[in-house]
Amino acid sequence: MATEIERKFLVTGDFRPFAASKHHIVQGYISAQSGRTVRIRLYDNKAFLTIKGPSFDGGLSRNEYEYAVPMADAPGLLALCEGGIIDKTRWLVNVEGHTFEVDEFHGDNEGLEVAEIELGKADEDFPRPEWLGTEVTGQRRYYNSQLREHPYCQWTDATRKDDAI
């Protein structure tokens, strides 16, 4: 069993000059119920099926299983997905031995940029570059499975302002 430990932050500055690479991601959810999700993700020219369990530790950790699937199967799996597809560019930014995955969302989530860092343990120290903003770990509305149902373009200015504090 693989346990994912990650923290999530809003992005408030320009991280692009520090990025080592970027990748195009399109993903949909075959099932997105409270406590578990099953998604299909196209990552550049590869496809993966991912199953995630419920969050624990205040949204910091959860069990995750990921399996490669043939690219030829990806369109059929995307057709099985519940409404709403996530389209984003993922930038990989290395900072002092840690890698931040910065997602720049497109489509209905345009304007939203979120950085995630995977950790080896929940209390691991990590660098905080100047472009890293407010922590939103455990806030469900920032989960990709939620963004497909309640996209960023539908959020109010007051909602966005609450997170900037």
Image: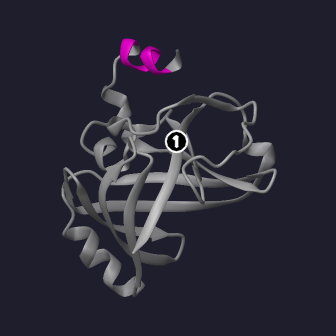
Residue 160 is a magenta residue: yes
Residue 106: x percent and y percent? Answer: 47, 44
Instruction: Looking at the picture, tell me which residue is in the foreground, 156 or 3.
Output: 3
Depth check: give the residue in front, 56 or 93: 56
Helix, strand or loop at disc 1?
strand
Looking at the image, which residue is at 50% across and 32% down? Answer: 111
What residue did someone put label 1 on? 8
The vertical placement of 75 against 137, above or below, is: below
Q: How many marks?
A: 1
In the foreground, 69 or 71: 69
Residue 81 rendering spot, x and y as whole percentages: 21, 63
Amino acid carrying label 1: it is: Lys
> In the picture, which quadrant includes the N terminus?
bottom left
Majority SS type along the magenta span = helix
The boundaries of the magenta stretch are 158-163
Q: Quadrant of residue 150?
A: top left
Tell me the residue at 72%/40% (across/down). 15
Say few, some or many: other residues with alpha carbon within 10 Å of mark 1 (under 14 / 14 to 19 / 20 or more): many
162 in relation to 69, above or below? above
Q: Quadrant of residue 140?
A: top left
Q: Residue at x 64, y 27 (%)?
A: 12
Q: Residue sitting at 72 percent across and 34 percent down?
A: 14
Residue occupying the far top of the picture: 158
The quarter of the displayed image where residue 125 is located: top right
Q: Is residue 64 above or below residue 157?
A: below
Q: How is the image coloured?
A: one colour
Left or right of 16: which side holds 8? left
Q: Is residue 24 magenta?
A: no
Give the x, y percent position of residue 8.
52, 41
Q: Is residue 126 left or right of residue 6?
A: right
